[in-house]
Amino acid sequence: MLNTYPQLTIVAEAANGADMLVQLPSAKPHVLITDIMMPGMSGYHLSMTVRRDFPAIKIIALSMSEEGSLIAKMIDEVKVDGYLPKASGKAELVETIEKVNAGITYYSATIRHQYDAYKSMQTNNEIFNLSLRELQIIECIMQHFTNRQIANRLFISERTVETHRKNIYRKTNTKGEASLVLFVKEHKFF
């Protein structure tokens, strides 16, 4: 897709992070576009390695996940220069590449919203002392995921999700999903 834009030159392509790291010294890209979820080395670990070993390369993250904790890791820890959902159109991707290459940080509106909501939730959580995993599960509950969907997304067992749900309900003094949703909205977690 990007080959159709004459202002862009693709200097390397790889199916995973390890293969990309091998190519970077000779390819010398200005901008690296990485998927967050890749086989083997994740986009997060690739990006952290690139930040350490090739600090001049600008990084754009692409992700199907709009999970706030993952977005926060990429923005706060990696300090990616751009972040887009994979569902973004060609025009927004090209615009992001051009902005990032020019030194302008760009996060799509969707990513910015999820990031802001997650940071707000973290701030408001200080009173309730919820763990990061519990916050991730609350985020999934707010999207009406089933225990199985939460387990698959977070790579944990359904039994573990059930245990976290019980702890969340206890800490927030709620009785179930409906009262938890009201609690989250009342305390402005999102």
Image (tube, helix red, strand yellow):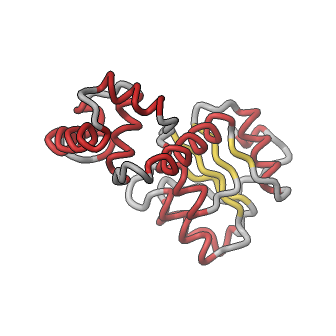
Q: Nearer the viewer, residue 98 or 185?
A: 185
At a point 47% along the width and 66% down the height, the residue shown is: 18
Residue at image position (71%, 33%) is 90
| Residue 92 rendering spot, x and y as whole percentages | 74, 35
Q: Quadrant of the N terminus?
A: top right
Above or below, comparing residue 84 to residue 44 in the picture = above
Residue furthest to the top:
178
Decide: is 46 above or below 104: below
Residue 168: name its quadrant. top left
Is residue 36 among the parts visible in the rendering? no
Q: Is residue 37 left or right of residue 134?
A: right
Find residue 35 and report its horizontal and vertical position in percent.
Answer: 53, 49
Corner quadrant of residue 86: top right
- The residue nearer to you, when weighing 131 against 153, is 131
Q: Is residue 48 above or below residue 67?
A: below
Image side of residue 126 versus residue 133, left or right: right
| Residue shown at the point (38%, 44%) measured from the top left | 136
Residue drawn at 47 percent across, 41 percent down: 67
